[in-house]
Amino acid sequence: MRMPDRLQYALNVDSSILQVRCPPTTLLTLVENAVRHGIDPSEEGGRIDVEIARNGERCVVRVTDTGVGLHHAANSPGTGLTALGERLQLIFGDAAQLRMTAATPRGTAVEVDMPAHT
Amino acid sequence: MNARATALIADDEPLLRDALRRQLAIVWPELEIVAEARNGREAVRLFDERHPDICFLDVHMPGLSGVDAANHIGRRAHLVFVTAYDHYAVQAFAQGALDYLLKPVEQARLADTVSRLNERLQSARPAINTEQLLQQLSEQLATLHRGGKTQALRWIRAQAGKIVRLIPIDEVDYLRSDAKYTIVAWRDGGKPAEAVVRTPLKELLEQLDAEQFAQVHRSAVVNLRAISHVKRHDNETAEIHIKGRDDVLPVSRTRSSCSRFTSRTISSVEYRRPSRRTLRWSSS
């Protein structure tokens, strides 16, 4: 790993959801962003939590980091998240949502909420 | 200098720190790595503690970058930037870096760097002068930061090789910023001369007498007494010709109100804050 001393991570995945179809590179984009914009600019590093859960007929993918947070980045989402949002829109229409919020006490949480199609 | 040369390695990726340390052990076994830093802040702290002869600095580091750390270290150590991006090269050399290594670092290339470093260490540039210079500059900075009006600057200390020159401010024709440096064009016994100082133009400007010096461009400050004539362009810009020099300074549009001095007595004009309103040039 590139920064073993600065990055911890944990996966929390609902096993019943492994069959759900997910657009390629969705999770990669979210985790890559968490590393690049959250953990990498932070001197002390941080932790990335990946949570994938079923919520009725919906699948929620949530990537939370304890990095430098939103105020360090540009206010509008960058290329990666914008492209991901557009792809979700093309695939699911208005049935999918992409949300980015500030995590507490610090860091960023990004959530993809989409229909749990198998 | 018979003592072993010492070095600091700064990189936020432990694997790359180890790799560089291993490569250095092969091409320069005598070199002693006295410190390893994980970010710019650590690099600065460890530099201040250990005073290594050489600093290998990664450019991209969290918090304080390698360039920031280099700014702090200045010429007190030989700097080598190590980075994955080659577009930092220019900045690295502006920072006074001895060399610039691209990741992944090749052994042969590193050996080349090492021989340059050895050469430099043997020629043993006097560290005392530069220390003094830095001290003086930081004192100037401190005075500035204490706020309030300081005495207008009377001398500029410029370093040329191993010599520190004191340039009387009255003999300065103009100042131009050049990346991290400021070029001081002055009269050495009447002859046009140039020197380079590390103080940014903006910082020097704050210390200059506004009656005598005017900022005519983002990157140029001119001694009004050194102006031979001003040539006007159609697009509200102009150029300033300096007495006894071929040099021409640009006048930017926003500052072209400075050009008032063509038609008035120099001392009667307020130059410090040129009005935003564009003044038409008049022949009267």
Image (tube, grey):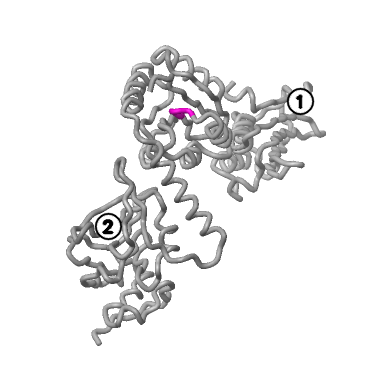
Residue A12 place in picture, x, y as percent: 76, 25
Q: Are marks 1 and 2 in contact (CB under 8 Å)?
A: no
Mark 2, residue position: B185
Residue under pointer 1: A12
Task: Indicate the amino acid at tag 1.
Answer: Asn
Q: Which residues are magenta?
A: B52-56
Is-magenta flag for residue B41?
no
Image quarter where the C terminus of chain B lies is: bottom left
- State the separation of the CA atoms marked 1 and 2: 65 Å
Q: Tell me if residue B53 is in the magenta stretch.
A: yes
Can residue B87 be seen from the camera position used here? no
Tell me residue A48's x, y (percent). Answer: 69, 30
Give the answer, above or below, for where B211 lies relative to B83: below
Q: Nearer the viewer, residue B206 or A45?
A: B206
In the rendered structure, the residue with mark 1 lies on which chain? A
Secondary element at image label 2: strand
Q: Secondary structure at mark 1?
A: strand
Is B107 or B73 nearer to us in this picture? B73
What percent of the width, then of the height, locates residue B266?
A: 31, 78
Residue drawn at the location 36% of the way across and 26% of the way down: B121
* Residue B3 visible in the displayed image: yes
Q: On what subunit does the disc labeled 2 rest?
A: B
Direction from residue B281 to residue B200 in the image, left or right: right
User: Would you call the spot at circle 2 few (<14 residues within 10 Å), some (14-19), or many (20 or more)?
Assistant: many
Q: Main secondary structure of the magenta part?
A: strand
Between A39 and A25, the residue placed more toward the observer is A39
